[in-house]
Structure formats: C-alpha cells, structure tokens
C-alpha cells in the first residue's frame, strides 16, 4: 500500500510528500540547530501518519505528550524500573498501541537507561508482533552520543547499543527509526549513517555542515545553503522524499508543543516600589524564613552533664524495655515471602538470560507489591539467594552437612560464578548426574558451552573440584572437601532446568 504524507510546501506550489512505506524501510535523520523547527517537523510527521502506522516517541522534554488527546497516544511515564519499561514495550508491540515515552524530569543517565530498556523491549518483541512502527527519537544525540560524556560508561553503552540496534537492525523487526538532532557532530556516526532520508535545517557550525555534506554526498560548498535556512525550512533528500536535494517548508500542526519559543513581551514600567518587591518576602515565604538566630543557652558545666548521664543510665536499667515503635518482623514470614517472589520470577523462562541487575530491579518492585517487611536485600545477598534457588536443592538436603559446607566453600568465589558452583555441587550432594555443558552455561547466563567448560577448569584450578571422564565419555565431578561426587553425566546432553526449591541458607 502506498501512502504519501503531506509534509508541507515544495517549490513552485508543489506539495512536499513523504512516502511512508519507503520511510519504514529507509529511516530518517533530521538535523538543525536549536529552534530550527525539528520538533515541529516531527510533530507534523507524527500527526499526518498517525492513522496509518503505529508510533512510539522517545521524548526527553515531554513535548509530545499533547499527542495523547487528539491522536490517542498513551503516555508512558519514564519514572519506572527498567524491567517494567521493557515489559511495557513488549506489550505495546503486541497490542499495537501508539505511545509517548515521557522522560522529562529524569537526569540524563536515567533517561539513557530508560530509553535503552524501552527500545530493548520493542526490539526483542516476539516475531509474531513485528508490525511496522515509527520510532521517533527527538534529541537523539542524548541517547547516541559521539563521545563519552559525564554519564557512566555502562549507561552510555546500553543506550548507544539500543540506538544502534534500532537504526541498523530494526528494519527486519518492523522498527523504523526517525531521529532528530541539534548537532550532527555530537551524534554517533554509525547511528546517523543508517538513515537514507535526510531533512537538513538551519546549521551554523562548520563541523556540522561538513558532516551533513558527507552524509548527503554533497560538495561542502553546496552545504553552505544550510546556513541561511529559516525556521521551518529544510532541505529534503532520500528515497522516501526526493531524489535531488529539495527545499521544503514544513506545514502547520494540529496539536501544540508544551514548550514554545520565548516571545518578547513589554516590560512593566519601572516604579519606586521595585526594591520593595524584591526584598519583601511574600506571605507564604514568611513562614519558612528564620528571622534571627535564637540566642544560644548558657553552657551546662561538664560535671552536671556527667551527673545527668549516670542518672539516666541507672533509670533506664531499672525500667522494663520500652515497647518498640515498629512491630517485630517475623523472619520466617519474611523469608517465605521472599521465596515466593523469587519463585514467581524464576518461572519466567527468559529469567536465566537477564542480567542480575535487571532481575534485582524486578525483585525489588515485586517485594514492594507484596509488602515484604524489613530492609530490602542487598544486591550481593539477592544474587546468592537467586543462585541457591536456581540450584534446585530440596529442603532436607539443604539442611545436611555437605550442602552447608558447599555454601561455605562458595563464599570464596566471585558472585557471578556462584550459581554455576551450586548447580554442580547440588548434583554431587544428591549423587545426581553431572550437569551438561548446556545446563552449566544457562546457569551462567550464556549459551556458550565453551564458557561452561572454562568455568569447570576455573573451579578445578581453585582446588574446589576434580573433573574426570569415564570410559563412555561421560563426566564426573568430585568435591574433595565435601567428600562426594556427581554420578556420570553426558557433557553434551540437553539443558535440563532444575526445579527451584528455595532452600534458605
Ligand atoms: N514550520 C513551522 N511553522 C510554524 N512554526 C514553526 C515551524 N517550525 C517551528 N516552528 C516554531 O518554532 C519554534 C521552535 O521550533 P522547534 O521547537 O520545533 O525547534 P527545535 O529545532 O526542535 O529546537 P530544539 O532543538 O531547541 O528543541 C516553536 O515554537 C515552533 O512552534
Ligand atoms: Mg526540539
């Protein structure tokens, strides 16, 4: 189906049309300095195409939330955990709802993490839901910066990875990236290079002009024309727009941006009361203003203080303990609630391949929903419980001496390999077949058998296990400290998930 979107006016009274289906396959990059009209242009594109294609706007300024009233976009508030955002994104693809991800008010690092989680959810949707979708990212240089900035490396990698996926590998999954940036030179090159359509607005800096000329395959001299473009005027080029550079004037929009350009308004006449206005606090401010520091009390002699302290201590000892303000936390109940939450999470087949940090976020939210009492588990404590849960040890064995010793031994290992250690140790403690490479790999959150074998070698180097192969090529792992060993198991066997049993430590 061919659908042409009217973007505004082209020379000689013609309309500037954009071929929507072609756009889905070839993506779009919009660049122009602040105030050149990029967000207006994106709004025009979104409004004109709203009835034809599902849309998602990654909106760092909260500008596009006004699309909700007229076009039915659902606004997703970015102040959520990353796991939640990923799940919401997956549902969006399934139900084909247009959305605005509102990231206003979050700091840059959080904006990057949220956008990465959300784009990740859109990207990883199941094949059945790969319907076409415009993914519009305003201020794309925030999410795909050309150089490292003040944010953590991890956040930058996540966000840049998600943007690269969107622009380089999104097409097959139905995702069409439409990105806008103030400064081409600040946008990661590989992200910009994947767009085949361009709308170039007013550009001042030589370095941006040079990048634009390179992308458009123009002479640098020709790119000089971008310097003189007025607000709302762009040069269009690309298979969805025009085969030759075409000047276009973006048309009007139906909805308004929440933020607009500053307008000059006349100043009030200077009056005699200007000083009063500035230095007199308003009535509502008065309440919070401390007028004068109170005079400090006369110092108490040290001997008196010591005296008071000994008296207070004697008094406290004589009295029965005061009732506490907070009810005692029932540890058993807390434990069983935590176990129930972990059970819920691990029932998700994808849980093995999510990072512990993502699972931990998910865990905290679930704990809040179930009102688990007491302090929340720290990330290391969570990791350990998760690893033990995944090993699938039953309650009775868990109480036995060998398992307790295995838990003790594992403490010398780095967090991320403890899960693997538990899986093999539980096979030894219960004299079950040695887990296959595939099972060990999953416990480590990978699909690589080679890594699984490397981990066993690592445990062996640490003196924790001895690995041997029997005549039939099956593997046996012995634990000298525990005085037990696994029965023989096929290293190339299938991945067999353990039944989580949630033995408490
Ligand atoms: N084609 C147009 N017709 C009418 N008004 C426009 C047009 N383009 C932009 N404007 C107005 O100009 C102002 C600035 O435009 P806009 O917010 O789109 O700029 P921007 O390039 O996104 O700037 P920034 O990079 O700072 O976000 C807005 O008030 C907008 O309504
Ligand atoms: Mg803008």
Image: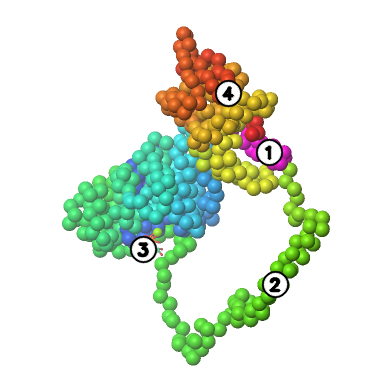
Q: Estimate the spatial distance between the alpha carbons at disc 1 and disc 2, rounded to whole Å.
A: 50 Å
Other-residue count near label 4 (Cα within 10 Å), few / some / many at <14 / 14–19 / ≥20: some
Mark 2 or mark 4: name the one nearer the start of the chain.
2
Work out which residue is located at the far bottom of the displayed protein and give it. 272
Q: Is mark 3 within 8 Å of ligand 1?
A: yes
Q: Which residues are magenta?
A: 331-346
Secondary-structure class at tag 1: helix
Q: Secondary structure at mark 3?
A: loop
Which mark sits nearer the N-terminus, 3 or 2?
3
Quarter that holds the C terminus: top right
Reading the image, the residue beneath label 2 is 303
User: How far is disc 4 from disc 3 in space, using C-alphas?
Assistant: 70 Å
Residue at 75 percent of width and 48 percent of height: 328
The residue identified by callout 4 is: 482
Badge 1 vs badge 2, beta-carbon distance below 8 Å? no
* SS assignment at label 2: helix
Residue indicated by mark 3: 35
User: Closer to the camera, 363 or 334?
Assistant: 334
First in residue order: circle 3 vs circle 1? 3
The residue tagged with tag 4: helix, strand or loop? loop
Please tell me which of labels 1 and 2 falls first in the chain: 2
> Which SS does the magenta portion mostly show?
helix
Disc 1/disc 4 C-alpha distance (Å): 27 Å
Q: Which is more foreground, mark 4 or mark 3? A: 4
Q: Quadrant of the N terminus?
A: top left
Q: CA distance from mark 3 to mark 2?
A: 71 Å
**In the rendered structure, are the residues bearing label 1 and label 4 in contact, judged by CB atoms less than 8 Å apart?**
no
Crowding at mark 1 (Cα within 10 Å: few <14, some 14-19, many 20+)? some
* Residue 238 appears left or right of 140: left
Q: Which mark is residue 335?
A: 1
């Amino acid at each position: 189906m061919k659908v042409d979107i009217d973007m505004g006016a082209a020379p000689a009274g013609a309309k500037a049309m954009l071929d929507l289906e072609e756009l889905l396959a070839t993506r779009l990059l919009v660049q122009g300095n602040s105030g050149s009209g990029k967000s207006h242009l994106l709004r025009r594109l979104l409004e004109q195409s709203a009835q034809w294609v599902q849309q998602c706007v990654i909106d760092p300024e909260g500008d596009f939330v006004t699309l909700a009233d007229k076009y039915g976009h659902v606004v997703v508030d970015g102040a959520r955990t990353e796991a939640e955002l990923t799940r919401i994104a997956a549902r969006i693809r399934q139900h084909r709802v247009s959305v605005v991800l509102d990231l206003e008010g979050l700091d840059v690092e959080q904006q990057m993490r949220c956008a990465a989680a959300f784009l990740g959810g859109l990207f990883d949707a199941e094949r059945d839901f790969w319907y076409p979708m415009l993914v519009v990212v305003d201020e794309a240089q925030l999410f795909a910066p050309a150089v490292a900035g003040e944010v953590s490396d991890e956040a930058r990698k996540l966000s840049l990875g998600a943007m690269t996926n969107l622009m380089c590998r999104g097409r097959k999954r139905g995702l069409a990236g439409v990105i806008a940036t103030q400064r081409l030179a600040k946008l990661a090159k590989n992200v910009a290079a994947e767009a085949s359509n361009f709308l170039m607005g007013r550009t001042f800096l030589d370095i941006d002009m040079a990048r634009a000329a390179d992308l458009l395959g123009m002479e640098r001299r020709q790119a000089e024309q971008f310097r003189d473009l007025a607000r709302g005027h762009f040069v269009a080029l690309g298979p969805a727009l025009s085969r030759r550079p075409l000047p276009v004037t973006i048309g009007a929009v139906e909805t308004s941006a929440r933020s607009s350009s500053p307008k000059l308004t006349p100043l009030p006449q200077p009056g005699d009361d200007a000083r009063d206005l500035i230095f007199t606090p308003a009535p509502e401010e008065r309440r919070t203003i401390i007028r004068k520091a109170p005079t400090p009390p006369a110092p108490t002699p040290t001997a008196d203080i010591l005296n008071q302290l000994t008296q207070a201590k004697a008094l406290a000892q004589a009295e029965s303990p005061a009732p506490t303000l907070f009810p005692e936390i029932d540890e058993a109940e807390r434990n069983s609630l935590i176990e129930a939450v972990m059970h819920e999470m691990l029932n998700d087949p994808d849980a093995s391949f999510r990072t512990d940090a993502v699972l931990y976020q998910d865990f905290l939210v679930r704990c809040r929903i179930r009102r688990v009492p007491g302090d929340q588990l720290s990330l290391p404590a969570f990791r350990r419980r998760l690893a033990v849960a995944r090993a699938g040890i039953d309650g009775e064995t868990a109480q036995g001496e060998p398992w307790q010793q295995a838990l003790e031994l594992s403490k010398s290992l780095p967090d991320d390999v403890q899960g693997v250690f538990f899986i093999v140790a539980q096979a030894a403690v219960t004299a079950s077949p040695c887990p296959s490479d595939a099972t060990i790999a999953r416990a480590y959150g990978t699909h690589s058998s080679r890594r699984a074998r490397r981990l066993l070698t690592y445990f062996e180097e640490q003196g924790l296990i001895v690995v041997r192969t029997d005549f039939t090529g099956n593997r046996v792992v012995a634990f000298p400290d525990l005085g037990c060993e696994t029965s023989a198991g096929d290293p190339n066997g299938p991945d067999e998930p353990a039944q989580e049993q949630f033995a408490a430590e």
